[in-house]
Amino acid sequence: MKHVIMFETSWCPHCRRAHSLLDDLYHENPAYKDIKIQYIDEELHPDVANSYDYFYVPTFYVDSDKIHEGVPSKEALKQVLDSALA
């Protein structure tokens, strides 16, 4: 299974929405629950965040590929999870 990273901040409303959408997707497809997502708060770990090319949170990387950046939708997060399973 591929490595998934989500960059976020504690105050970001779109990040909270992404967590909620992920929970919905986990219930819809049990295979998604096996995907391990590494959550990185860019304010707590700027050294890690600065080594990736993105501007907006949440941002999702699968392995080294940026799959989604910015305002999340259920479809976009499904694409992230499907990419991790592929």
Image (cartoon, grey):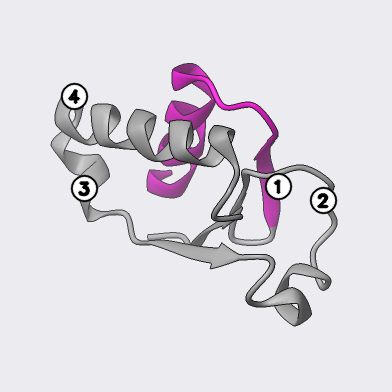
Which residue: 43% across, 28% down? 78
The residue tagged with tag 4: helix, strand or loop? helix
| Category of crowding for the residue at label 3, using alpha-carbon neighbours closer than 10 angstroms: few (below 14), some (14–19), many (at least 20) | some
Eyeballing the image, is 33 above or below 13?
below
Q: Earlier in the sequence, mark 4 or mark 2?
A: 4
| Category of crowding for the residue at label 4, using alpha-carbon neighbours closer than 10 angstroms: few (below 14), some (14–19), many (at least 20) | few
Q: Amino acid at mark 2?
A: Tyr
Which residue is under mark 2? 54
Q: Is residue 79 magenta?
A: yes
Left or right: where does residue 76 sit relative to residue 19? right
Q: Is residue 19 magenta?
A: no
Which residue: 54% across, 55% down? 10
Q: Marks 3 and 2, Cα distance to the nearest angstrom?
A: 26 Å
- Quarter holding residue 47: bottom right
The residue tagged with tag 2: helix, strand or loop? loop
Which span is picked out in magenta?
Answer: 65-86
Q: Amino acid at mark 3?
A: Lys
Q: Marks 1 and 3, Cα distance to the nearest angstrom?
A: 21 Å
Q: Earlier in the sequence, mark 1 or mark 3?
A: 3
Q: Marks 4 and 1, Cα distance to the nearest angstrom?
A: 24 Å
Q: Amino acid at mark 4?
A: Glu
Left or right: where does residue 42 sit relative to residue 19? right
Q: Earlier in the sequence, mark 1 or mark 2?
A: 2
Which residue is under mark 3? 33
Which residue is under mark 1? 66
Which residue: 56% across, 27% down? 72
Which residue is under mark 4? 28
